[in-house]
Amino acid sequence: MRFKHETDVEGFRKEVRDFIAQELPPEEERLRRGEEGGFKSTQEEYDYVMGFQKKLAERKWLAMAWPEEYGGGGASHMRQLVYNEEMAYHGAPSMNMGIAWVGPSLMLYGTEEQKKQFIPRITSADDWWCTLYSEPEAGSDLAALQTRAVRDGDEWILNGQKIWTSGGHLADWGWLAARTDPDAPKHKGITMFMVDMKSPGVTVRPLVNIADRHGFNEVFFEDVRVPNNQVVGEVNRGWYHMAVALDFERSGIQAYAGGRRSVERLVELARETPELAQQREAIRHQLADRWLEVQVGTFLAYRVATMQARGMVPNHEASASKLFGSEMSQRIARTGMNLLGMHSQLRDGTKHQVQDQATNYLQSASSTIAAGTSEIQRGIIAGRGLGLPRG
Ligand SMILES: Cc1cc2nc3c(=O)[nH]c(=O)nc-3n(C[C@H](O)[C@H](O)[C@H](O)COP(=O)(O)OP(=O)(O)OC[C@H]3O[C@@H](n4cnc5c(N)ncnc54)[C@H](O)[C@@H]3O)c2cc1C
């Protein structure tokens, strides 16, 4: 079976490719600087990502499927899919948390005043958001979170600690879940807040990952005052708002489009490297397997996108796509390590070094943890997808 989008969508794909060719620095340069996919660690990388996103915002591409009344492009889900595919394939930094779930959640649950204040600054790439869900004792079991918010007149007072906060050191605003009713059952006493990350009492401390990158942080809140008009949705209904936001997070095509480019790079390398000739048979099979996985996964992501296009809310289908994509990206990284051997540890200079497989490999370890672990995704597929009883 061959899949083909409508003509105007394919024309749009060309427009996106032309834009990328003009605006994105060459692939080798970005790989060398470790910038591919918009990974931000330093202020310099952040400036590069924001600069690129401003250009997308000028074209109304950053929030392309949002309604025009909210500053979006009003584009169809299929256009959005093609755009995401092209951006991820070329490693362009086209996404941020404000676009991915803060804005969509505000459109559903925000007040008119909140929409007016926050949404235009998201669509114009003026504000950078971080997500403050996880805590030292609350990850997979997110409803166990202990950060407390206590009402004090027109304000709330926040105390507690968050962890693994991606980009928290660069963020203007935090999208935070806190416990507001400690006596209620644990899913029923949580509220969502928008917190100014420059507020007095907020301390951000770096956490450096195994690839020696500073992407996430610990964030401490000590008597931080948050105005009541920065509560999102209903007080004590935050768990349900968060669950919808997590479904926004898990439905992307990005892993497969990026994976496709990674496999292509490895294939190019295998063709051009005479030393690899001796192990050719084993490598051929590994690369063929990775290529098949990219194809299968792409269809899983298309399924999620076509459900969204029909107004459905994907749930276990998004988990299946997230699970397969994250495990696939680890297998691609492992194949790259096998292919390059000792060369995988080198960085700039030769063709080998540009691949920087070791960093890629180390970074990929986190993909089956971020946005919900593989075990949690399997639990969702087993329970909600297959209707199996809880173990
Ligand atoms: C790259 C990266 C970026 C992240 N960014 C953010 C961010 O910006 N904001 C944020 O809030 N959080 C972020 N996180 C945190 C992430 O959401 C949590 O790490 C994740 O939900 C797992 O929680 P945990 O680390 O506490 O592990 P735990 O929940 O303690 O899990 C430990 C192990 O037990 C298993 N396990 C737990 N419960 C079950 C169960 N019910 N059934 C079967 N197995 C189970 C898990 O699968 C895992 O293997 C990020 C994480 C990573 C890796």
Image (cartoon, rainbow, N blue to C red):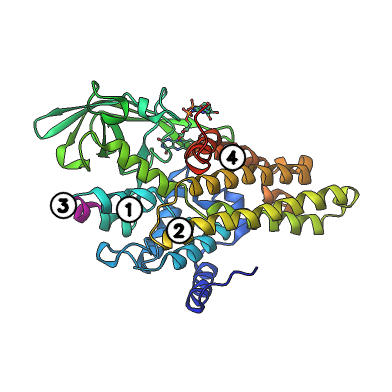
Badge nearest the viewer, 4 or 2:
2
Q: Is residue 375 visible?
A: yes
Amino acid, disc 1: Pro
**Front-lying residue, 182 or 37:** 182
- Residue position marked by numbered label 3 in the rendering: 113
Q: Residue at x 76, y 56 (%)?
A: 269
- Residue position marked by numbered label 2 in the rendering: 307
User: Of the numbered discs in the image, which one, if any, rests on residue 363?
Assistant: 4
Separation of marks 3 and 1 at Cα, in angstroms:
15 Å
Mark 3 surroundings within 10 Å by alpha-carbon count, few (fewer than 14), some (14 through 19), many (20 or more): few
Amino acid, disc 4: Gln
Separation of marks 4 and 1 at Cα, in angstroms:
28 Å
**Front-lying residue, 190 or 222:** 190
Look at the image and give the residue range highlighted in magenta: 113-118
Amino acid, disc 2: Met
**Of pointers 3 and 1, the one earlier in the residue sequence:** 1
Separation of marks 2 and 3 at Cα, in angstroms:
31 Å
Badge nearest the viewer, 3 or 1:
1
User: Of the numbered discs in the image, which one, if any, rests on residue 219?
Assistant: none
Q: Residue at x 62, y 37 (%)?
A: 362
Would the CB of label 4 be found within 8 Å of ligand 1?
no
Q: Are discs 3 and 1 less than 8 Å apart at CB? A: no
Q: Residue at x 58, y 59 (%)?
A: 89
- Residue position marked by numbered label 1 in the rendering: 104
